Amino acid sequence: MFGNRCYHYVKDVRNVSKKIFTKETILKTAVTISKERGLSRLSMRLIAKKLNCSVSPIYAAFDSKDDLEKAVFDYVVNNNNATGTYFERNKQVLVAGINSPELYKDVRRLSNKFHSSLKHYDDLISLMKREDSLVDFTDQELESLHFDLMTYINGLVEKSLVDFKSIIDLKEYISILDQVTMCFIWGYTYGRQFD
């Protein structure tokens, strides 16, 4: 491996050609496979097969499967958290979960293993405080609201797998999430008067 490039020689009857696999190419292939099959079913051999090469360039780019899983995890999390408001990101999480449920479950499972929860928490609270409807919320209320919304999103993803995928389309899931979000905010806002 030289820099971020991994070389794999492909023998041809007429000549020997060199095929270059960058770390980024390998990672994007791993993400594609993970979206189809889930991160838990990802293997170096599966990536090699998809790239039509041996496992050597994959191991040259990533020291272990754990290293590769971490890279895929980071890619997926950063991709879902790249842009938008807090509420837009929640919609992105819902769409990602419905479109790639196995990968979604694996990312949830691995979040404690790979993610710095303190940094994520601070970023999340800061993002939530930028929402006009949440500016008067305390950090504890924001944390509770986020937990409630993520629990609801997880439920929608699970439900889409079981019996509603053919009945409810993605736009309806997003509409349901918007309505539930408004109900939660209303509940937290008006629930204060009974504390």
Image: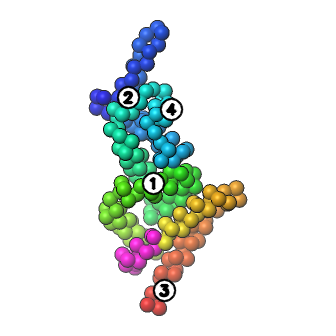
Dot 2 corresponds to which residue?
56
**x and y percentages locating residue 154 in the rendered image:** 53, 63
Q: Nearer the viewer, residue 82 or 122?
A: 122
For the rendered model, the colour scheme is rainbow
Q: At which x and y percent is residue 11?
A: 44, 15
The residue at the point 58 percent across, 61 percent down is 158
Q: Are marks 4 and 2 in contact (CB under 8 Å)?
A: no
Q: Position of residue 108 (x, y in %)?
A: 46, 58
Front label number (4 vs 2): 2
Q: Earlier in the sequence, mark 1 or mark 4?
A: 4
Q: Amino acid under label 1?
A: Val
Q: Secondary structure at mark 1?
A: helix
Mark 3, residue position: 191
Q: Amino acid at mark 3?
A: Gly
Image point 47% across, 60% down: which residue? 89
> In this picture, which residue range is highlighted in magenta?
135-147
Disc 4: CA contacts within 10 A as few (<14), some (14-19) or many (>=20): some
Q: Residues within 10 Å of mark 3 (few under 14, many from 20)?
A: few
Say which amino acid is labelled 4.
Answer: Lys
Does any portion of residue 9 appear in the rendered image? yes
Specify the amino acid type for callout 2: Ser
Gap between marks 3 and 1 measured at Cα: 33 Å
Residue at the far bottom in the pictured view = 194
User: Image height check: is 39 above or below 142?
Assistant: above
Residue under pointer 1: 107
Residue topped by disc 4: 50
Tell me the element at label 2. helix
Could you say where residue 160 lies in the image, as x and y percent from the top left? 62, 59
